Amino acid sequence: MTEPSPYPPLSRSWWPMLLLFLAANLYSIDKAIVGVLAEPIKADLGITDIQMGLLLGLAYSLLSGVCGLWLGTLVDRHIRRTVLGCAIIIWSLSTVAGGLAPNFESFFIFRALVGLGEAAVAPAALSLIADMFPPERRGRALSTYLIGASMGTALSSIIPGWIVGANLHLSIPGYGLVIPWRSAFILCGAIGPIVGLLFFSVKEPARRGIRADAMRGPTAVDKLAYLWRQRAVVVPLFLGFCLYYVAFVGVAAWTAPLLMRSFDAQLPDFANMLGVILLIAGVSGYMLGGLSADSAIGSRRGGRLIIMTILPVIALPCAFSGFAPSLLLAILLLASISLATPMLNVAMNATVQEIVPNDMRGFSYAFLSVVSALPAGTGGPLLLAWVTQSVLGDPARIATSFVIVVIPSLLGSAIAFLLARRAYLRVGSDGELGNVIAASRN
């Protein structure tokens, strides 16, 4: 191995961290805006709940899943700032184009391009953070980056709510006036290319933990073989993440329709309240996640996996939100999963950084997306739509769908994380995984 180079000084890390914060903000807005505007999109395009579920899930996840491992390899082998800059420009322009889509098919294509661009962000960002901050600061750095995602989720409710409430119609040269939901897409996607271009000003940090005599990095086959050798830990860990995200993505995608159908409300009636409460929950979750990941409990052997086992249980109240006696209480119940998810993300990302070598972190995050987040991203929204439309046969019964889908997913997630922790505790200090874990802590 090469001698570890010093971590960059904080004075050189604030600018890339600011841009990573903005990137997380933007991808959360552009990802979540479809769910927030699901009802007006459905009405304008004339589509069903199941078709909407495809737009909320499969459309976004399709290309990111198919190309995810390739994107992870790009992150491991190429300049990460360039990957990030190009990805942001691609997804932002695709968001704008989605606002002009005339039908379900074209909207589906543009959402797929949004998913493709955003799939490169997490592997590149998390790989950069691992090389910019020492282990004792890494949890807080991760939470700082991911707080941007919570702010984006909140703004994805507040901004469209304001636009719809103001009945804003933009005038597009050569196209004409666009209705409010389309205006929201155009405005939310417009700033992204600027942030993408700014990433080209970032100085790439040195990669740590790379062999001095390595002429090339490990191949995709080598990386998959390593993950398979660690399957006792990796399989339940990734399965728990997948099951959790079946619940989370489904809840996030159908939150606005749930509130509109169960409480006879319109988007402007709750958009600000929902945005503020989700912002408080999300930011609090990332702050607590960073502190807990770096705490005495989180830093001890298997400690982060203890935290990950508890978090799905904390999120359970969201399943009953559609049966709350008031709109405010429903949003507060929904906030339980918005509080738990950031904490889970920090613990999960820190765990992956710990159990894989530096030169396969980007690949491993992408692989996690393919085998866990892809089924969850597709299955969560679609499963809720299918239960509502085909099993219950009544769009107004979406609250019951939440109970049917969310509770088993979260409980299964907790069990899987518990199994991962048991396997982690059996890892020997002199084995392959033990050596990787030891190297990650230096």
Image (tube, rainbow, N blue to C red):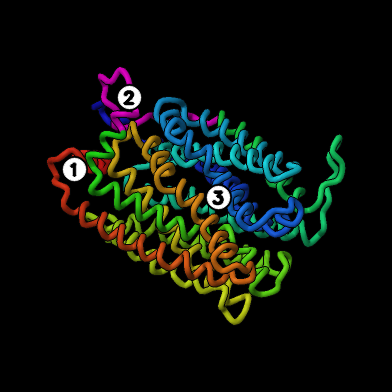
Q: Is residue 3 above or below residue 64?
A: above
**Gap between marks 1 and 3, in whole Å?**
37 Å
- Quick one: quadrant of the C terminus? top left
Label 2 sits on residue: 217
Q: Tell me: residue 306, above or below residue 318.
A: above
Judged from the image, the secondary structure of the residue bearing numbered disc 2 is loop
Q: Quadrant of residue 197?
A: top right
Please state if 100 lies on the left or on the right of 438 as rendered: right
Residue found 69% across the figure and 42% down from its top: 98
The span from disc 2 to disc 3 (Cα, nearest Å) is: 33 Å
The image position of residue 168, as x and y in percent, is 82, 54
The answer to which of 257 and 155 lies nearer the viewer is: 257
Tag 2 or tag 1, which sits nearer the N-term? 2
Magenta segment's dominant SS is loop
- When the figure is inspected, residue 250 is found, relative to residue 368, above or below; the finding is below
Left or right position of 87 against 233: right
The amino acid marked with disc number 1 is: Gly
In what quadrant of the picture does the N terminus appear?
Answer: top left
Q: Is residue 332 visible?
A: no
Q: Which residues are magenta?
A: 201-223
Location of mark 3 (residue): 57
Is residue 19 highlighted in magenta? no
Q: Looking at this view, is 371 or 442 the one in front?
A: 371
User: Residue 208 colored magenta?
Assistant: yes
Eye-nearest disc, 2 or 3: 3
